[in-house]
Amino acid sequence: MNSTHVVIVGAGPAGVRAAETLVRKGVAPVLIDEGMRAGGQIYRQQPQGFSRPAKALYGFEASKANAIHVCAEDLASQIDYRPKTLVWNANADTLDLLCDDRFEQLGYDRLIVATGATDRVLPVPGWTLPGVYTLGAAQIALKFQGCAIGDPVVFAGTGPLLYLVAYQYAKAGAKVTAVLDEAGFSDQCRALPGLLRQPSTLAKGLYYRAWLLANGVRVEQGASLVRIDGEKRVASVAWQQGGVEHSLPCSAVGFSYALRSETQLADLLGCEFVWSPLNRAWLPRRDASGRSSLEHVYLAGDGAGIMGADAAEMAGERAALAVLQDMGIAVDGARAEKLERGLAQIERFRDGLEHAFPFPEGWAAKADDALMLCRCEEIRVGQLRDVVRAGAVDINRAKALCRVGMGRCQGRMCGAAAMEIIACESGLTIDSVGRLRGQAPIKPLPFAVGPDA
Amino acid sequence: MSALVETDVVIIGGGIVGASAALFLRRRGMEVALIERDYCGSRSSGVNFGGVRRQGRPLIQLPLAQRAHAIWNDLPGHIGIDGELVRSGHLKLARSDEDMRSLERYEAETRGFDMGLELLGEDDIRRRYPWVGKSAVGASLCPADGHANPRLISPAFAVAAKRLGAHVYEQTPVVRVEDAGDDFLVTAGDGLRFRAPWLLNCAGAWAAGLALQYGEPVPMRAGHPAMLVTEPLPVFMTCSTGVEGGGIYARQVARGNCVIGGGQGFALDDRRARVDQQAVVTLLRQATTLFPSLHGAHVIRTWSGTEGYLPDRQPVIGFSRMRRGLVHGFGFAGGGFQIGPAVGDVLAELVCEGASRTPIEPFSIQRFQHVAA
């Protein structure tokens, strides 16, 4: 075995395939994951002892999920696999870890960052009521704990996850009252050429929607979420469609606007970031092979730009091949090229998806001053607008002056929305309001800590 | 053609010292240009612990601290906001009898400064401050000290100066300082040039370069106080708190977050600093011993800054001995927030009146004259 310390952060499809690729060449990496079991968010496994079949949990993706789980299980004995471990800070050659309330440090020679994604949230009035979840959280409740977020449920927002989650809920027996798709039918027609690059993925999307309609689920397109009402928890949801307001009673709402990359680790490492118009976000720069701007850091999967689980598997393998190449180990060049071609094709499909599920650009202009923007620090849209009007047009300066993004989530939830408000209020383009600087810890640290190793 | 701004005073550095100097110079009717490389109050002045504390300062700083105390008492009058200033009292804990004797000595030595220090025994602490851990055997309380939000206050000094007519240039790095006869010619980013007979060196941890240019080398090093903040917790910490001998300090803001500092972070580069795991772990341990209610709480953010330290941990304040018109105010060794506004006032006084009514001789740059260039 090679003595180079290769560390992979994240055991989703990218991280698992990266580990597999390294092991095949005799390099045993350390695979660190926050989750209890491998699979990431997309292929999240139910707890040990739960026995729902893969088909029920993952639908069309059951075989892919299964393959990742089996692969991770095979690898576990051949690598240093560390589940339930948070990487909370990183320096040039060391990761700071927290596992079971114990601090540890881990050196690395080469590091593959496969940190995945979370939902992108754009607040609407009532979004902090109990019973409101992101689409991803709604899916986790179902996949991991086998429970629904409520009954009946309305799903809203945009992105491929919208129809998938609604389908999974309805299939599992939950009452889904409506799917409110922010995107209009015309958006989806315009997107068709790009979507046709991945006919099977497109077919799945169409299938979910057709299935929902056939099973009596109301599907509304061009439906813009207006507010979520309720006293102590969700009671109903209101949306606007063609200038008319509608509403429906429900006990829970799942909503989000596609996904955003989890980039804090890349940021703390010092990776160079570039603006991605497609993701409408600052992302760590990576080349086709997954090499970052830092010599020993590689990026794979949705953590460096949203491309989905299939792309994550390819990117994980490609990044691992890059690690091997940089270690002077011969790899199959044709395989590397094939992966890069495949990733490029998915990227073009991603373009199509972005047209099919366009970002609701009018959100910031419509947001009321009283709307809760940063729920951790309880900062409303108007408070951010005040500091912007006073001259704070940089997101970090605005954060310092009004505390937006300064709380428990460190801007992971509200950062994207805060940027939209600053850009809209200042008249600057979204890419010129700066990038929220990452600060350790990536996730909160408890005071109750045992001895460090 | 680059613009030339002719003014009375150019101030380099928009931290709390430079910004308050700008404010107090405007009050005295001087034309002022305040030049800041980043945003005003965004470096050490804006990211420090936020202690508004006289207790514990060396005797030579107390006249300045008292002068600052008066400014802090009318903060909204000066900068238009209260900056979350709370006169919570500053509680300095002793963790040994020896530390307690040291607090007693300090109380005796500083009686002339009207701080009203109150010495507390172990029983007093248990009764009045039940949230303090058992390791404290005594304490000294300075009732009128407190804490405030540096993120808001330091930028607000620059805003207040601007409101009074100071010209404030943010995100404007100084490229070069030259002489133009008796005047200074300062070239900054974006082709801006400034000409003035007075130049204030308020560049914090980055001030040594200008001092050196004028033949006054100072042995300043950068330090990086480690800081962290918890999620909001039920309010329990009713005083801003420190310990005799240093090492840890804490305060709780009205929203419930506890800000805790102590130990050192490290420099990422010339401008940025961070806290490492060892510093965080040490702080977490010490804090839970000193404040048991923190057990189970979460730290949501850590940070550090870049602060200038001279070997005697005292600042440099006063006229340059080498160049007429150059005035220094830097090197506050992590303790500049409370006295900052008074130092700004003193610098303005030096420019306008030629002398300070508060003694500043101990802070003369001359004390480093033996240092080789």
Image (cartoon, coloured by chain):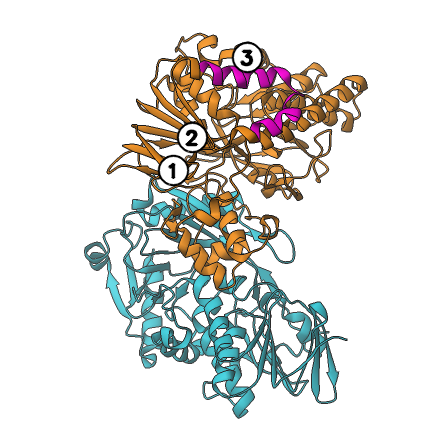
Chain colours: A orange, B cyan
The amino acid beneath tag 3 is Glu
Position of A249 with respect to B58 (left or right) is: left
The structure residue drawn at horizontal position 54% and vertical position 74%, both measured from the top left corner, is B18
Mark 1 or 3, which is nearer the eye? 1
Discs 1 and 2 lie in a common subunit: yes
Residue B172, position in %: x, y? Answer: 64, 67
Any mark on residue A73, and which? 3
Q: Chain of mark 3?
A: A
- Specify whether disc 1 shares its chain with disc 3: yes
Who comes first in sequence, dot 1 or dot 2?
A: 2
Question: Tags 1 and 3 in contact by the CB under 8 Å rule?
Answer: no
- Please say if A419 is above or below A397: above
The answer to which quarter of the image holds residue A317 is top right
Q: Secondary structure at mark 1?
A: strand
Main SS of the magenta segment?
A: helix
At x 49% / y 56%, what residue is drawn?
A398
Magenta includes A200? Answer: yes
Of pointers 1 and 3, the one earlier in the residue sequence: 3
| Residue A392 locus on image (x, y percent) | 52, 60
Residue B212 position (above or below residue A97) = below
Residue A114 appears in the rendering:
no
Q: Report the mark closest to the observer, 2 or 3.
A: 2
Q: Does residue A40 appear left or right of residue B253 in this picture?
A: right
SS for callout 2: strand
Q: Which residues are magenta?
A: A187-211
Query: Residue A156, which numbered label?
Result: 2
Q: Which residue is mark 1?
A: A244
Q: Which mark is residue A3?
A: none
Q: Residue under mark 1: which chain is it in?
A: A
Quadrant in which the N terminus of chain A is drawn: top right
